[in-house]
Amino acid sequence: MTARTGLGPVELALLDAFDLLGADADGRRVRCSDVLTAVDQRHGIGPRYAWPVTVDLGVPWRVHLPLLDLYGNAGTQGGDPPADARYVEGRLSRVGALALAAERGEIDPVPLGLIEGSLYREGPVPPFAPHAVVGALLAGRDDCGPPVLPTGGTVEGDLAALLSGEPVRLRLGCTIRDEIERLVITEVPLGVDADRVVESITNRLHRYERGEGRALAYVRRTDADSAVLDVRDESSARDGMRIILQIERSTNVARVVSWLLGIWPVTIEVDARLPHPQPERLAGWDRGDGGGLRALADLLREPTI
Amino acid sequence: MAASRRSVELAAELSRLGAHAVVVGGVARLLRSGAGHPRDLDVVVAEPDVDALVSVLALLGARLSARALRLRQCVHVDTAWGPLDVFLGAAPASDEFDVAGVRLRVAA
């Protein structure tokens, strides 16, 4: 990881290639397949490896601050895969351009590594809220709060131990809202696709019993899940994620929520560890004269970021 | 619910529905000593029991390809109880444990 942004070498190679092909933040979009070809020629990193990284850098359900502005089918949070790179265009986002400028020494460092961590690429470092990290660095504070996932959802575990640099196991969970006669999942953890959540809940509503000397027979569970009448995904571009669980009017909602949280991947567990205690990470981050940090703070104030 | 408890529940569910597999790895250690926090379930299944395990997993909504298991000897499956790693091979020495009224074969 580079000290100036926290980006990995493949990520940096991709940003560099977009820029060299003229696809900077104010430029035209280029076909992602052309970028992948350039990365292969310059760095020997083939499209099979570089394409998933490209997508990760450009979708808001993987990172807080996408470094690429992708146009076309880059997949969905529901688990649909992206189209072939030939059919997706992209250019640097404003934050991506800032990161590249920081890497080239044109501006001072930008704390993307502190914000995004490495969990989005299945590393151990969880992400933190961009505004909280930038605010803490600007104010000289040594605390920027608990981890915050770009997808939303809950983060539970021994957070004090995590922030002091110890290895911990975090439990990442869906956000579940209690509406009238229904529960609504509005956010899923980082790395979890919504279709899988629906499928798992549906599977857990079934139960098969083997009677003595008899064949398997389907029966309805009689536990908390018997109060769940229906599961359906009503997610849309307008309303965002809405996985609806219709429940019986008189049911004990807390019991159903507890049952739900026992289902994988309504909750998942990840092993997490910060490379250093969080106060050291924040206090020790080399900001130069702070120009990169202030530029990022300005971008975060814009409503489109 | 912790992932370790979820994995134990999955083992019990497999056994209850008639799959013959031996629990190994972290869940076996947890059941024997109470130690560890496994995130997934590992089981060993013998060749004659593969098809039964495939059928049971299908009942649970999980897809395991018998052909893939025979080809690769080790297959990962995601279930509503969490991840499951299935190993094909001779069953290791095991003892029976009673978990929630179900007899589980747990590697020694």
Image (spheres, helix red, strand yellow):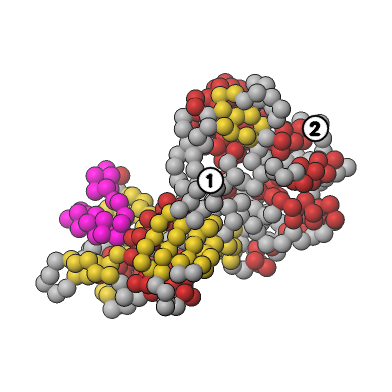
Tell which subunit mark 2 falls on.
A
Quick one: label 2 or label 1, which is nearer the N terminus?
2
Q: Answer whether residue A89 is visible to the viewer in this image.
A: yes
Q: Locate residue A252 relative to residue A143 in the image: left or right.
A: left
Q: Amino acid at mark 1?
A: Ala
- In which quarter of the view is residue A38 placed? top right
Q: Locate residue A169 relative to residue A305 in the image: left or right.
A: left
Query: What percent of the width, then of the height, locates residue A78?
Result: 46, 47
- The residue closer to the viewer here, B100 or A173, is A173
| Residue range of the region highlighted in magenta in the rendering | B44-71
Badge number at residue A237: 1
Residue at screen point 85% across, 56% down: A140
Query: What percent of the width, then of the height, locates residue A43?
Result: 59, 26
For disc 2, the marked residue is A105
Query: What percent of the width, then of the height, locates residue A296?
Result: 77, 43
Tell which subunit mark 1 falls on.
A
Would residue B69 be counted in the magenta stretch? yes
Few, some or many residues within 10 Å of mark 1 (<14, 14–19, 20+): few
Residue at screen point 53% across, 32% down: A72
- The kind of secondary structure element at disc 1 is loop
Few, some or many residues within 10 Å of mark 2 (<14, 14–19, 20+): few
- In which quarter of the view is residue B78 placed? bottom left
| Outermost residue, right side | A289
Residue at screen point 69% across, 42% down: A304
Badge number at residue A248: none
- The kind of secondary structure element at disc 2 is loop
Q: Locate residue A294 relative to residue A61 in the image: left or right.
A: right
Of marks 2 and 1, the one in the foreground: 1
Would residue B60 be counted in the magenta stretch? yes
- The residue closer to the viewer here, B78 or A45, is B78
Q: Answer whether residue B32 is visible to the viewer in this image.
A: no
Q: From this view, report whether residue A122 is shown above or below residue A67.
A: below
